[in-house]
Image (tube, grey):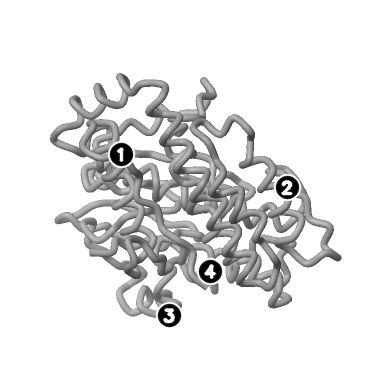
Amino acid sequence: MIKRTIYFGNPAYLSKKDEQLVIKIPSVKEETTEQAEPDLNQKYKNRGNENIIPIEDIGIVILDNQQITITQGLLAALLENNSAVVTCDNKHHPAGLFLPLESNLEQSQRFQEQIEATVPLKKQLWQQTISSKILNQALLLNKIGIQSDNMKKWSRDVKSGDPDNLEGRAAAYYWKNLFPQELDFKRDRYGEPPNNLLNYGYAILRAVVARSLVASGLLPTLGIHHHNKYNAFCLADDIMEPYRPFVDDIVVTLVRDGEDFTELTQSIKKQLLTIPVVDVFIEKQKRPLMIAVQRTTASLAKCFSGDQRKIIYPVFRL
């Protein structure tokens, strides 16, 4: 079952009753508060500005307004349901992520297997990850008519641990060619738009991956490559790498379609909130991204336990 992504951009009071998320809107504005139902405000009016959503249907909750109040009972129920809760700052950028501490019956054993993973194993897993990322980047460039045979070769040439830093070489070529030349785009987290769109999309993707890692009994903090001591989601940042081109695809389409990308408008957010349900190909089958990520993290857990040698990643299709 595909879990829902719920976005709140207006003031709201959120609580729990009978395993339902209860939404109360103190004042209704023109902006919609839920991604999939643009006429929801009218429904709220009809129900006295109140609506309910089954908690078991929720995968991700995004809180993007400084006047949202949420009860402890609801937070606990969301975490028990393995829902990821993302909070945004006053600039509407994702600022935090809540995840459950326990979500898998074998969590203790899997933590131990993850901790005891050898350096050669982690280097091999990183090799697979970067090879898949470069290939997906190359295929996205092909989609928009850019030659990328060099990147496809680099994806095949990645060695254990990527000692030649082919990831960096591929990134330089990729970012130089992904957006129209007149944009003179430079990928920088704090750089000019459309970097803000990429950051927002990656934050959603990170929440999806972190949630799935927890469900697979893995600790998102312990990465196979990323190891910044201030980063609580190193493993999520590792595993999301081959999935980034799916976010880039949405952003580059927005730019090429001529949409004003200088601000994170409600329209742009809605399109980026579709990330968990975009179709990807994994094991030669079309699956929603959120389901594919679950396949990836489950295969990673088997790699740590020694039952499998390869992580299963999606392949970008034109």
Q: CA distance from mark 2 to mark 3?
A: 43 Å
Q: Which residue is mark 4?
A: 271
Q: Residues within 10 Å of mark 2 (few under 14, many from 20)?
A: few
The amino acid at mark 4 is: Gln
Q: Are marks 4 and 1 in contact (CB under 8 Å)?
A: no
Left or right relative to 198: residue 97: left
- Disc 3 target residue: 39
Pick whichever, 188 or 76, lies toward us: 188
9 versus 231 height, above or below = below
Q: Which of the labelled discs sits on residue 109, or is there none?
A: none
Quadrant of the rendered image containing residue 198: bottom right
Depth check, mark 1 against mark 2: the one in front is 1
Task: Give the mark nearer the N terminus: 1 vs 2.
Answer: 2
Query: Callout 2, which amino acid?
Result: Ala
Vertical position of residue 275 compared to residue 301: above or below: below
Bin the neighbour count of mark 1 within 10 Å (Cα to Cα): few under 14, some 14-19, many 20 and up.
some
Answer left or right for 209 relative to 160.
left
The residues bearing labels 2 and 4 have C-alpha atoms spaced at a distance of 27 Å
Q: Which residue is mark 2?
A: 172
Q: Nearer the viewer, residue 143 or 18?
A: 143
